[in-house]
Image: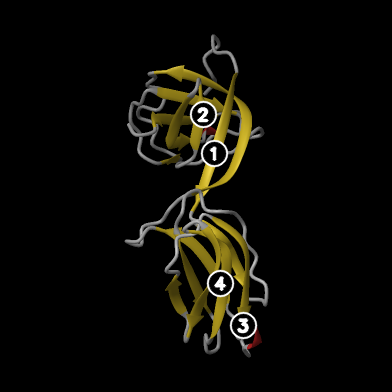
């Protein structure tokens, strides 16, 4: 599989998202914050693997128009959610949890009041790719396809040596935002085929 010869490379941007603001880590006296919430959100802490799971995590940040510190207390391994919705995070510490005989692992993700995940920008990467409209390139090619295979509005070709594209990534192209619905990786069938083929659908479409 090769790209259509009449296509010219375009400037594209790949954006990836994650609900996690605290990536998985062994609980220490300082809890490392990976990123800020994209929008004001509750923080859902999950503690696993601790011998007793007794202790408190303190998180400081901007919520309801002021800088506050909220205590999240664990009495066992499990999930605890803040009562405040945080927009920016300036620090997090813990007491008790780092002193256990078996120290646990903690994460924190952003959620709505009903517990639904809130996605935050994880990374933004500029790259060059090839884009064409309304193609049946992937019709019938079921092998090594991640995601549903359907005829969509946009097909994108990328070199895996330049960038990795996964289902769920968003692509900014021509001042519009698209989501990757499926990816075909022909190199799994023939290493000489050096393009991945992604199907894009408009965000909200």
Residue 106 image label: 4
Contact between marks 1 and 2 (CB within 8 A): the answer is yes
Q: Residue at x 38, y 30 (%)?
A: 201
Image position, residue 24 (x, y; %):
58, 66
Between disc 4 and disc 2, whose residue precedes? 4
What's the CA distance linking mark 4 and mark 2?
A: 33 Å
Residue 45 image label: none
Residue 172 image label: 2
Between disc 1 and disc 4, whose residue precedes? 1
What's the CA distance linking mark 2 and mark 3?
A: 43 Å
Image position, residue 13 (x, y; %):
57, 31
Quadrant location of residue 146? top left
Image position, residue 108 (x, y; %):
52, 65
For marks 3 and 1, give the one nearer the viewer: 3
Residue for badge 1: 15
Circle 2 SS class = strand
Contact between marks 4 and 2 (CB within 8 A): the answer is no
């Amino acid at each position: 599989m090769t790209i259509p010869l009449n296509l010219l490379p375009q400037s594209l941007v790949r954006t990836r998202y994650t609900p996690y603001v605290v990536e998985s880590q062994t609980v220490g006296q300082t809890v490392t914050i990976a990123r800020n919430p994209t929008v004001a959100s509750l923080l859902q802490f999950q503690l696993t693997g601790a011998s007793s799971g007794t202790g408190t995590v303190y998180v400081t940040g901007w919520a309801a128009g002021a800088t506050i510190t909220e205590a999240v207390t664990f009495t066992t391994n499990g999930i605890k959610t803040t009562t405040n919705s945080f927009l920016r995070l300036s620090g997090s510490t813990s007491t008790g949890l780092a002193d256990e005989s078996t120290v646990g692992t903690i994460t924190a993700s952003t959620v709505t009041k009903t517990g639904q995940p809130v996605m935050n920008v994880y990374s933004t990467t500029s790259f060059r790719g090839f884009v064409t409209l309304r193609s049946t390139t992937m019709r019938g090619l079921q092998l090594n396809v991640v995601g549903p295979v359907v005829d969509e509005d946009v097909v994108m070709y990328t070199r895996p040596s330049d960038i990795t594209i996964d289902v769920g990534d968003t692509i900014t192209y021509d001042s519009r935002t698209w989501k990757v619905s499926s990816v075909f990786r022909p190199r799994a069938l023939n290493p000489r085929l050096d393009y991945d083929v992604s199907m894009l659908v408009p965000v909200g479409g």
